[in-house]
Image (cartoon, rainbow, N blue to C red):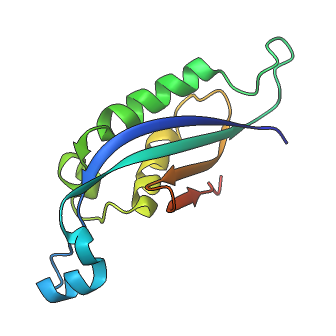
Amino acid sequence: MIVLHKVFHFCAAHRYWNEDMSEAENHAAFGEDVRLHGHNYTLIVSVSGPVDERTGFVADLGQLKQAVRERVLLRLDHSHIERDIPWFHQRMPSTENLLRWIWLELKDATLGGRVVRLRLHETESIYTDLIPDE
C-alpha cells in the first residue's frame, strides 16, 4: 500500500474548562491550560489508493489541498476554537476532539484518495492520530 502524506499548518487558541467542575477541579485537571493559550498546529492528512497510471500519483493534491483549506483551515486558523466553532461549544478543544471534528469535515470530501490517517501535532512533543474505521 502506498500512502501520501500532506502537511498543513494553522494557528488557534483554546482553553480547557469544564463548567460542571469547580475552579479547583478545573485547575487540578487542566493546570495552567485553564487560561487561554494558543498553538501552532501541524495537521498531516494521509491518503492511500491505487497509483493512477496516467499521472503516477495516489491523489490529486489540488483536490486535497482545496478540501482541507475550505473545510478545515479557513475555519480553524486564528480561531478561538471553543467559541468560534459550534461543535466545540460543549466539547473540550483537545487534539483528540479536534481530530474527530476534522474527520467529520473531511470524510465526505473529494480528496482524490482514501484518508487512512489524520495526525495533529499540538506541540513538538504532543500529537494525536485518528485512523478512520471506514
Asked whether, in this view, residue 129 is left or right of residue 70, the answer is right
Image-quadrant location for residue 72: top left
How many numbered circles does the render carry? Answer: 0
Q: Is residue 22 visible?
A: no
- 9 is higher (above) or lower (below) than 53: below
Counting from the top left corner in percent of width and height, residue 116 is at: 67, 47
Residue at the location (53% across, 60% down)? 128
Residue at the location (42% across, 28% down)? 69
- Which residue, as the protein is rendered here, is positioned at the far top? 54
**In the picture, which quadrant includes the N terminus?**
top right
- Which residue, as the protein is rendered here, is positioned at the far front? 124
Image-quadrant location for residue 94: bottom left
Residue at the location (49% across, 39% down)? 106
Q: 25 or 109, which is in the foreground? A: 25
Counting from the top left corner in percent of width and height, residue 90 is at: 23, 64
Q: 110 or 59, which is in the foreground? A: 59
Image-quadrant location for residue 9: top left
Asked whether, in this view, residue 9 is left or right of residue 28, the answer is right
Asked whether, in this view, residue 113 is left or right of residue 28, the answer is right
- 28 is higher (above) or lower (below) than 131: below
- 121 is higher (above) or lower (below) than 11: below
Q: Is residue 26 visible?
A: yes
Counting from the top left corner in percent of width and height, residue 63 is at: 56, 21
Residue at the location (20% across, 70% down)? 34
